[in-house]
Amino acid sequence: MNRDSALDLLAFAVGCQMMGPDGRRALRISLLMDLGEKAPPVPELATLWDEDRLIRGEREPVTVYDRWVLMRARDEAERPLFDEQFWRMRRVDLEGAGFNPNEAREIIASVRASLGNLGTIGKEEGDHHGNVQQAA
C-alpha cells in the first residue's frame, strides 16, 4: 500500500465509523442486494436482513442467538464512535504505508482535532443513547 492509499483508507475508515452501527449494517445489506446474482452463494444477506429486523424491533427475539444479537447490537451502540484502538490501528496502517511514526501521529492528531466532539454523529435523535439531552 502506498501513502496515498493509506490516506484514502484512513478517510474511508473514519467515514464508516461516523455512520454508526446501524448505518454500517444498512450499507452491508444494500451492497449485498445490489450485487444480486453476483453475490456469493452464502446466506449472509438473509442473516443480515433477519438481524436488522430484530434490532429494529420488527420481530421478537425467539432464540438464544436472537438475544445475543440484541445484546451485541446494544453493546456496539453504546461504545464511542472512535476509541483508542481505532486510532492505534489507523496509525499502524499509516506506518505500514511508509509514514514515519511522527508523521503518522501528526496525521491522526490532525484528523482527531478536525472531528472535534462527535457525541451525536451516527446516532438518531431520540434514540436510547440519551443524545437528545447531550445535545441540549
Image (cartoon, grey):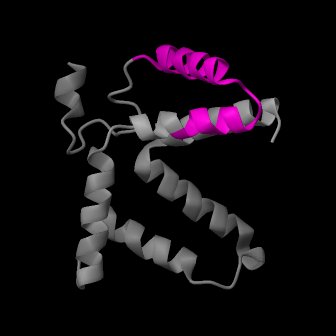
Please indicate whether residue 56 sits to the left or right of residue 85 in the image.
Answer: left
What residue lies at 57% left-to-right and 21% top-to-bottom?
Answer: 105
How far across and down, in percent of the image, does residue 63 sit? Answer: 24, 85
Q: Is residue 78 above or below residue 72?
A: above
Q: Position of residue 28 (x, y in %)?
A: 57, 60
For image coordinates 55% across by 77% down, the residue present is: 44
Magenta span of residues: 89-116
Q: Residue furthest front?
A: 101
How far from the left and from the top, in percent, is residue 67? 23, 74
| Residue 9 part of the magenta-drawn span | no
For residue 47, above or below residue 76 = below
The quadrant in which the C terminus is found is: top left
Asked if residue 15 can be seen in this view, the reply is: no
Image quarter of residue 74: bottom left
Tell me if residue 45 can be seen: yes
Residue, x 29% and y 80% (percent of image)?
65
Which is more toward the observer, 105 or 126?
105
Closer to us: 46 or 64: 64
